[in-house]
Amino acid sequence: MGKSATHVRFAIVGDIHVNKDSAGSLRGFFAQAGEAADALLLCGDLTDYGTAEEAKILAEELAGVSVPVVAVLGNHDFESGTPEVVCEVLTHAGVRVLDGSACEIEGVGIAGAKGFCGGFGRGSLGAWGEPIIKQFVQEALNEAMKLESALAKLRTPRRIALLHYAPITGTVAGEPVEIFPFLGSSRLEEPLLRYPVDAVFHGHAHRGALEGKTINGVPVYNVARPLLLRSRPEQPPFLLFELPREPGEPHA
């Protein structure tokens, strides 16, 4: 599928989990995604252990992509305790890493944050009891505030949100119910109700569901690569999503 004069197309995927053995294995995949879209969006867990070596391999695999690349980090990118190194390597390679920040691609605003866990709805963990519980809940609140801050920066008519953790239960359905609280948080949905978007994308839930909706009807897509590979074996393991171009918006 070629570029469109009437729509802006995004190739979106998460949970790539690049490791030291990934060198040379993803270039064709990324090239295919770049050729199909106006931008490539990555929904976290870009690396397996969050090391500089893995980040450099990912940067090399992305070198052949000629369209803009936008990403958020995931929990795996924090495993080695140096997420700033992952960000630095990717930023140096031209990737826009969002963390409570926003950017614009051909008239479409993109707000990005990693997000965090904590549970959904009445099952959300409350800030009560031991200090460590309060700290855990505060992290969820901090990530929700990052998302809200990013959304508030957008001034474009068309907007999308990029996350790693899920903001709703609909797209984690299929995972064991016992681990739902570790897959996302309803607190991430709250900013999406105050600042409406056209779509939300996340990863993390490898055995979740491909699509759900927020309580105000906004589509939410789980683009974890293992889920896409298993659910749509006949298609490339990225989601192709398009939005109409605004009148007068130039086509690159």
Image (spheres, rainbow, N blue to C red):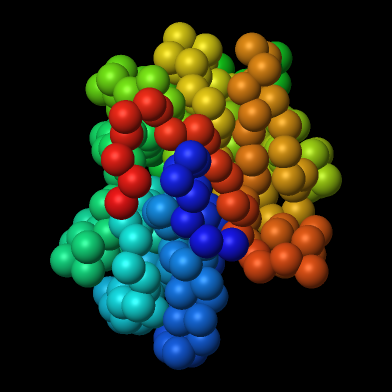
- The residue lying toward the viewer, choosing from 14 and 6, is 6
Where residue 86 appears, as percent x and y from the top left, is: 28, 64
Q: How many marks?
A: 0
> Which residue sits at x=63%, y=33%?
220
Q: Position of residue 227 (x, y in %)?
A: 72, 58
Q: Decide if residue 43 is in sight here.
A: no
Query: Could you tell me which residue is drawn at 55 percent across and 21 percent down?
Result: 189
Q: Where is residue 91 in the image (x, y as percent from the top left)?
A: 21, 60
Task: Name the residue nearer the viewer: 142 or 229.
Answer: 229
Left or right: residue 57 compared with residue 198: left
Taking the image as shown, residue 70 lies to the left or right of residue 177, namely left
The quadrant in which residue 168 appears is top right
Side of 22 where 65 appears, left or right: left
Q: Which residue is drawn at 55% across and 31% down?
A: 199
In the rendered image, residue 134, in percent from the top left (x then y), is placed at 43, 23
Q: Which of 69 and 79 is in front in this view?
A: 69
Q: Is residue 114 visible?
A: yes
In the figure, 104 relative to 30: above or below? above
Q: Quadrant for the N terminus, please.
A: bottom right
Res 146 quadrant in image = top left
| Residue at the image position 49 percent from the left and 41 percent from the top | 7
